[in-house]
Structures are given as C-alpha cells and as structure tokens.
Amino acid sequence: MALRVALGLPKWTPNIVLMKIAGQEVLSEKIKRLAAQFFIRQLANGVHSPIYDQNCNPGIKLIKRDEVMLANLFTELDTSTDHIITFPDTLISRSNFCEIFLSEFSFQNKAHPAFLIKDLFEEVVYKEFQDYHIIATDASKSHSFTSIAGISNLQSFVYRIHPTNSIFTAEALAICQALDELSVTDKNLLLLTDSYSVLQALKCLTIKSPKVIHRLAGKILVRKNFHQKISLVWTPGHSLIHWNEKADLLAKTVTESHPLLEWIAYEDIISRYQTISLQKTNLSFQHSKYQESIGDIPAMFTLTPWLKNRREDIIIARLLTRMIITPVLLHRFGLHNYPRCQICNRDNNIEHIILFCSKYSNHRSILYAKLNFDPQLCSSLKAFFQNAVSDKRHLRILLQSLKSFDIY
C-alpha cells in the first residue's frame, strides 16, 4: 500500500508491475535478504558480535531453513563464511596512527597537466620522503578478474581476489597486502595509492567504517609498533607518476594462473545479494503477461532527477504502467458507461489517445516533430514510451505536450 501511495498508482495496479516500476524487491525475497544480511553482519563483527560467547564460539544456532538459505548464498558466491573480512580483535577508535596526505601537496591537483604532476611529485618525494621505502599499490576490476598489485624497489606482488569485491575493497586490500609483503623494518614507509576514497575512509575512521578499513588500520598499527613512521599519500591516477603506472600495469596483467586471495567484504556480499534479489523482480516481470503489453518499464528513481514535482512523478508512473485514467480503464471497473472513442469508435485507452485518435492528429504531428520521431517506428505505445523516456529532453517534451491530449 505504501508503494502505491508513494508512486500515486491506483490500488488495482498489479503487484509485479508495482515492484518493477518502484525498483523494489519482491517482499518475500527482501525478508530473506534482510535475515541473511543480519547474520552475515554479525559474522563480520567477529568477536565483537553478541552472537559469540566469551570463548569466541557462536552462542546461537540457525534453524534449518535459514541455514540452508545461507549455505546456498555462499555456494552461489563460491566462497565461505571463513573468508569474510571481520573486525580486528582490538578496535581502533583513533585515526592519528599514521600520516594521510590527500591534498596537502601541490601535485595532488588533477587540474594540472600530467607532466607537471609528475615533476611536482618527484620534487615532493625528494624534499619530504627522501629516506622512505616507497610502495605503490593499485587494483583493477574487469569482466574477467578483480585483482590487486603492489610494487617497491625490492619486490612486487599480483593477486586475484574474489570478483564480488568492489574496487574500493580491492584498493584497501592492496594496501593491506603491501604492508604484509613489501614492508621493510629498517626504514619509514611511504605508501602511494590513487584511491582517494580509501584514504578518506581511513582518515575518518569510526566504528561504522567498512570492515576492510578497520583491517587496514590494524595492519598499519602493527607496523607502527615497530617504531616506523608510515605515510599514505594520494597520487592522481594516470598522471605519468612511474610508481602508479607500474602498479596499474601490474594489476591489469593478472591471469588465471595468479594466486587467489579469498577475502571478501561483508558490504560487497550484501550489495551483491540485493542485486540478485532485484534481478528476481525483473525476471518475474519478464515472465509475466504484463511484459508483452507494457514493455520493459524503467524504475522511477532513474527518471525522478528529470521530473520537477510529485505531480509529474505520478503522471509518468501512471503512463508507463497504463494506469492513467481513461474511459476504458474506468469502464473496466464499472465507473464509466461507454469505453469507446466517440470520434473513432475504438477503445478509448491511452494508446488510442496518444497514437491514433483523429481528434489529436495535429498535436500528435507537433509532438513527433519535437521528439524527432518517425511515426512508422512508434506504431505501438510500448515503442513510443521506450523512446520518449530515454533522455531528459524527450521526457520534458512529452510532459509539456500531455495537456494537448487532455491527459495532464
């Protein structure tokens, strides 16, 4: 009921059509997802979760149905609960355990040309970090692989990681792995990354920060205990800085033969699960009888930035779902005596009004001219709306023209 009110759709709108245009999961799937999300979050919280007792053993047991559901989810993801990135045993509540430079240096300005960024970077390293051991990291995500890489003067590494991980998680994992594999104990460390978002998250560390950021903070603190000074510096990507370019190239050379790190972020599992749940809504709609009649309607949230007010939201939602008030729709529910057009003697539905009714032929010609549409290619309302809501300009023209069709 709440979705119908929010979208301004009548109560006879079919549920699957309502879910599709709202961009929402089917309620039964959403309940399953939220249940799984709660339990996976507790696993990610590790020993800090109330589901664990004082001996770090789970203090609860799932019922069989939920146990099967979670097992199926992790089978689909090709991973296990053992590989979820968890909070470190000791939480870090402060962010001053290392130096983080996001905009303090002159080369950290992407408005500069690449050659100038390169020269300014080399000057900063020479003046500020001359005795530091330099490490550069990067991550890459493609249709084939998600990978991380790190490089220093002494050695380098390349790993595949679980494809569900986001590029944010990958960039953070790359720094974690670099601290493990590329650090030296006799020098201070300078870590270079082109991930501004990871360094920003680390700088603003809170209990709500992603688990991978807490893991990174924990690893930095371990190096700090060796009395090392650690500086993390953001470097603009693709700016001819040779450290970045080497790490970037290394991350993109990953193949199936490279070793796999199986860590996976809780946040990315939940995001993936929600995507799967939404895909089930789309699949249910595609297999329904409404797909043939109204086409593959977009979710309203993709159109809302182009609409000016709630009135326009409701009009577009009703047009796309064919729930706009017409004599045919009213007659269907016994609210109108004559469902046919008095001029054309055809069913007076929205398709007839916009595409065929002779009463609006002049307005139709003007609308097609403004939209630059070929009437031959818009012989059905499904095809017409598919083009009319494809961009902001077309949508605004359609809304302005509806008054001429006695719809607005």
Image (cartoon, rainbow, N blue to C red):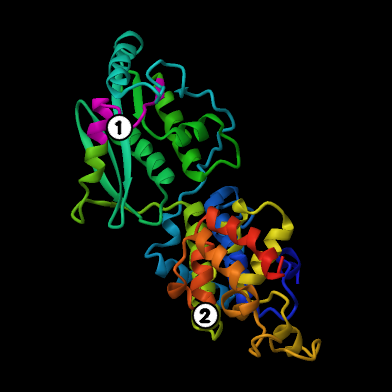
Give x and y (percent) for residue 216: 44, 36
User: How crowded is the residue under tag 1: few (<14 C-alpha within 10 Å), some, or many (20+)?
Assistant: few
Q: Quadrant of the C terminus?
A: bottom right
Of residues 401 and 64, the one nearer the viewer is 401
Identify the amino acid type marked 2.
Gln
Residue that extends furthest to the front in the rendered view of this protein: 362
As measured in the structure, the alpha-carbon distance from the residue carrying label 1 to the one carrying label 2 is 45 Å
The numbered dot on residue 130 is none
Q: Assess whether residue 127 is covered by the magenta stretch.
A: no
Where is residue 201 drawn, in percent x and y? 52, 35
Which one is earlier in the sequence, the residue at label 1 or at label 2?
1
Residue 294 visible in image:
yes
For image coordinates 54% across by 86% down, the residue present is: 289
Q: Where does the magenta region start and end?
A: 230-247
Q: Is residue 245 magenta?
A: yes
What is the quadrant of residue 183 in the picture? top left
The residue nearer to you, when weighing 117 against 322, is 322
Instruction: Look at mark 2 in the image and give the residue it sits on.
Output: 291
Would residue 295 be visible to someone looking at this image? no
Query: Helix or strand or loop: what does disc 1 sit on?
Result: loop
Res 107 quadrant in image: top left
Left or right? Give the position of 28 relative to 235: right
Q: Nearer the viewer, residue 133 or 385?
A: 385
Label placed on residue 238: 1
SS for callout 2:
helix
Residue occupying the point 32% across, 20% down:
117
Q: How many marks?
A: 2
In x, y percent, where is residue 60?
61, 65
Q: Amino acid at mark 1?
A: His
Question: 10 Å neighbourhood of mark 2: few (<14), some, or many (≥20)?
Answer: some
